[in-house]
Amino acid sequence: MPKVVLKLGDNVSTDIIYPGRFMATVLPTETPQYAFADITDFNARIKQKEFQPGSVIVAGRNFGCGSSREQAASCLKGPDFTIIAMDFARIFLQNSINLGLNTIICPGFEAGEGDALIISPAKVTNQSTGKSFEIVPLPKARQSIIDAGGLIPYTRQRLLHDRK
Amino acid sequence: MGMTYVEKILARATGQSSVKVGDVLEPRVDLAMSHENGALVINQFQEIYQGTGLEAKVWDADKIAIIFDHRVPAESAKTATNQKKVREFVGKQGIKKFHDIRGDEGGICHQILPENGYVLPGMVVVGTDSHTTSHGALGAFSFGIGATEMASVWALGCVLNVEVPATIKVSVKGKFQPFVQAKDLILHLIGRISAQGANFKVLEFHGPAIEKMSTSGRLTICNMAVEAGATSGIVPADAETIRYLHEEAGLKGDIETLRPDADASYDQVIEIDVSQLAPQIACPHTVDNVNTVMDMAGKLINQVVIGSCTNGRLDDIEVAARILKGKKVARNVRMLVFPASARIYRQALKEGYLATLMEAGAVVMNSGCGPCLGVHQGALADGDVALATTNRNFKGRMGNPAAEVYLCSPAVAAASALTGVITDPRKAEGKVVDHA
């Protein structure tokens, strides 16, 4: 059962998720070491591979605002975090979908660090409090990218289809 | 039902007679811009082609622009190697809209695109930079995307799954007071609607104050539209747009423009009268934490930064030079000036603005993004306070999470550089205290 490993507030910017000074590092295999670099204790735990895949980061409104830097999504995809937020900034959300980072829009979601969650397609249940929260489904068009396994395979399919 | 400006562009870019909010489209792309992060786009682009048996060739080399600006000249071997990789790709693919690290044609991408006439009204422009919203100033639908999405654009020539965004109409009237600028208007708007106030929407600017505004000012407001969460900011192209493209970008011949329909449907209409607008300050650590300069006056500052894609154009440098002429930057302040492009740098040199600023104590740096996002020069010390004409004040933005960044117009920045504290430029002129 996935657990909440970090709880954040509103307007968490890409400068918090992946500080600009590490932007020369671009490869998804290398970016996780700088995830939340300025939240030093959490960053240290990422580097020690302390978190189970699917561990949950909870945030408020407008998660991922700011830069288009894709490192902000790839650095969270590496350790396979799930992000549950009230809502997301546009470019970050699209980058997450394109890279297959699990992002869940769940207005009103309440959980604290350490809480255990049950995540189903339609709702998230906080096992620790017994409360359930509705998930806002992604637009259909975006779901098709997720179903293809991300934008790279999706574009590859399109390319091969278009050339036929 | 009539169409908004962005609906008109998207209808045209998909060959339809009309589109409406929420439609999912695959608009063809007229211009696809990247900077150093082109290195990541190249990786993703090559991965798309793996196992397909197809040659990895971009859909149209003439519609791709690549500008080095984030770390110029390279600050590390890693960056230099990324830049080399992009340079080789550019040569191999035959991309001509390439601006390397040069004093004749280099600069910040969001200045290079307009000043070279690469952006025309009605275009669909995408860029791997969130401030790609800037080019709405020329009447394009222009928005930021990630590197993988750009790789997909390079392969297919269209952006997949674009939902037609709702539009907020911003109608601006009145005459700006002296030393109150476009930057103050956009900071005021962001403060009013919040950092999420235009999420997934377009801000379409209208009204007499916008009609009178230069393209430089329009670039400032569209640049920061993303700080309200907007997909794009747009000023429908008009006589000023045509003037800019002919006189400043050097284009010749007729330029087609389009207008939104009078009966277009808007999500929201916001009216602003700038007559009473005071200079604005965005306080740490969110861009919507906006106060007037009067509220913040007297705040001690350690570094003043004038430049960036937001406010590094000739008129921005001119107003700073006018305020600093014959005076001295306060001893406790470091003042950094970085023009938005090499062309602007040379113009400012010719006009004598740079000499004026240097004589006052400012350090003039080459064009680039470095100080704004803390990747290359101008980093802040623990506890430092910076006052900058840039676009973001997020924690850690200028390279140090233990520092603070306040955002303002070039006039406020220059007036404050003289006093060493946040200062109202309307009051500073002529009676500036010289701490030197």
Image: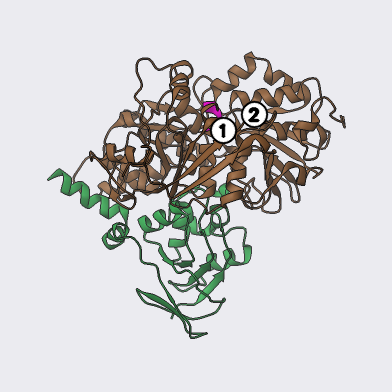
Locate the N terminus of chain B and report the quarter of the image it occupies: top left
Q: Colour scheme in the image?
A: by chain
Residue B365, numbered label: 2
* Separation of residues labelled 2 and 1 (CA atoms): 8 Å
Residue A50 appearing in the image: yes
The residue closer to the viewer here, B356 or A141, is A141
Instruction: Specify whether residue B181 is painted magenta.
Output: no
Residue B368, numbered label: 1
Which secondary structure dominates the residues rendered in magenta? helix
Locate the C terminus of chain B and report the quarter of the image it occupies: top right
Residue B188, numbered label: none
Q: Which chain is green?
A: A
Specify few, some or many for label 2: CA neighbours under 10 Å numbering under 14, 14-19, or 20 or more. some
Q: Which residues are magenta?
A: B214-218
Q: Is residue B351 left or right of residue B124?
A: right
The quadrant holding residue A81 is bottom left
The quadrant holding residue B118 is top left
- Mark 2: amino acid: Met
The residue shown at (57%, 22%) is B344
Q: Which chain is brown?
A: B
Residue A159 drawn above or below residue B419: below
The residue closer to the viewer here, B385 or B165, is B165
Q: Is residue A22 left or right of residue A84?
A: right
Q: x%, y% of residue B245? A: 44, 21
Q: Is residue B433 left or right of residue A44?
A: right
